[in-house]
Amino acid sequence: MSIVLISDGALERAGCGRLAETLQQRNRPCLTVGPALLSLQPLSGMETEVLIDPLQLLGHPLLEQASAIGLFLQKPQDVRGFVRAYRAICRNSGRPAAPVFSGPLIPLVGDALVQDLIERCCCDLLLVSGDVQLKQVQAMTFNWGKHHPWPDTIATGFWFDSKQSGPASPQRMLLALIQESVPTYPGATDQLLRQLRNWAQKNPSWTVVLQRDHAWRTDRPLININGRTPLPANLVSAAPGQMLPLLGRCTACLTVSSPWIYAAMAWGSIPLIVADYGIHGRQGTTGFFGSGTMHHLRSVRQLDDLLNLPGVNQTWLDSMGGAISNGTDRLLNALDKLSKPNNRESGAS
């Protein structure tokens, strides 16, 4: 019997891959499953042991041998549909359903956390990042009663390794995490890219690396030259599969709200959350309130100013999941508890 880990996106696959490694270190059999990821990816090692679409798994012999199912899909509403169909198939075939666990992996807060978990509360076990999320879940479900059962919820920490993957860069490096749809304001991404270009031109002792945090196609350059002044030599676009090594090597890391900034924070880089777009749910910046890392672009006149920025609020980072180093053990303990008779109670269907 194996724990089956299902993912359909790059971040989700990275989290499942790390979880699979730690499970195997504890001699717990597991299997990673998911579809092939198309386009160019910011992360390497995105292969799964079994290539198959999640919906094609329903009724598949793989799930019949599962001791538990970890379901990490990009759209939380897809989790509800999968769980309903899986349990219906199990009922019709006369076999018990394996416990299903799921969670958003990244540290959501407020409305974003509520909206995500409401779609996942059909699972037997929910995973969140840190104590902040646990407290918000407890507040949300206070006094719900037996008519609205809520699944057990545990905090398991961040989805990436606690230690960086390599030595710091010998030359000062600013890594800019460019998101696909944030900032949402028209022309805002182009404006940010122009600022990064200007910084590179005026600071030749720094390397400015543009890193997409999402999949992309080769025919979509980040910066269009259009016959104008050539790009400065110290402004480069990251190659596919390089994001994690760059996060471990960079001097400073800038983004509007990419969740991968948490890795830069945990690994000791200087973080800068661009505050020009405000603290807003649409920009994904609400979760960074209290981090001490939000700064306006105008506060950085030259890149050496980054060296004087304060570090992340460690208390805040710990509460978001940074203090948890035994997430896999917490998960196994919760799954073992669910496997005991009379201890399992499914969430809302």
Image (cartoon, helix red, strand yellow):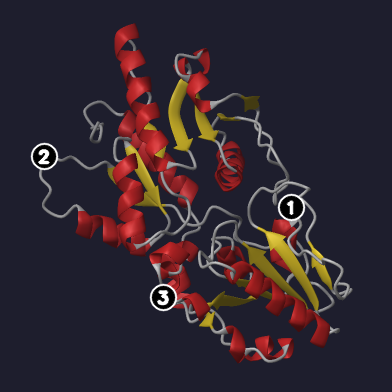
Residue lying at the far top in this picture: please name it: 93
The x and y percentages for residue 265 are 58, 71
Kind of residue at disc 3: Phe
Kind of residue at disc 1: Arg
The x and y percentages for residue 43 are 70, 49
Position of the C terminus, as image quadrant, is top left
Name the residue at 60% across, 76% down. Answer: 271
In-front residue for pair 215/29: 215
Q: Of the residues under marks 2 and 1, which one precedes in the sequence?
A: 2
The x and y percentages for residue 161 are 61, 56
Query: How many discs mark residues in the rendered view?
Result: 3
Local crowd size for mark 1, using a 10 Å CA cut-off: few (<14), some (14–19), many (≥20):
few
| Residue carrying label 2 | 146
Local crowd size for mark 3, using a 10 Å CA cut-off: few (<14), some (14–19), many (≥20):
few
Local crowd size for mark 2, using a 10 Å CA cut-off: few (<14), some (14–19), many (≥20):
few
Observer-side mark, 2 or 1, equals 1
Kind of residue at disc 2: Lys
Q: Quadrant of residue 225?
A: bottom right
Residue 289: mark: 3
Judging from the image, what secondary structure is the residue with disc 2 in? loop
Q: Quadrant of residue 172?
A: bottom right
Observer-side mark, 3 or 1, equals 1
Name the residue at 28% across, 60% down. Answer: 136
Q: Is residue 94 visible?
A: no
| Residue carrying label 1 | 220
Judging from the image, what secondary structure is the residue with disc 3 in? loop
Q: Quadrant of residue 9?
A: top right
Mark 2–mark 1 Cα distance, whole angstroms, equals 52 Å
Q: Of the residues under marks 3 and 2, which one precedes in the sequence?
A: 2
Residue 113: mark: none
Observer-side mark, 3 or 2, equals 3
In-front residue for pair 39/345: 39
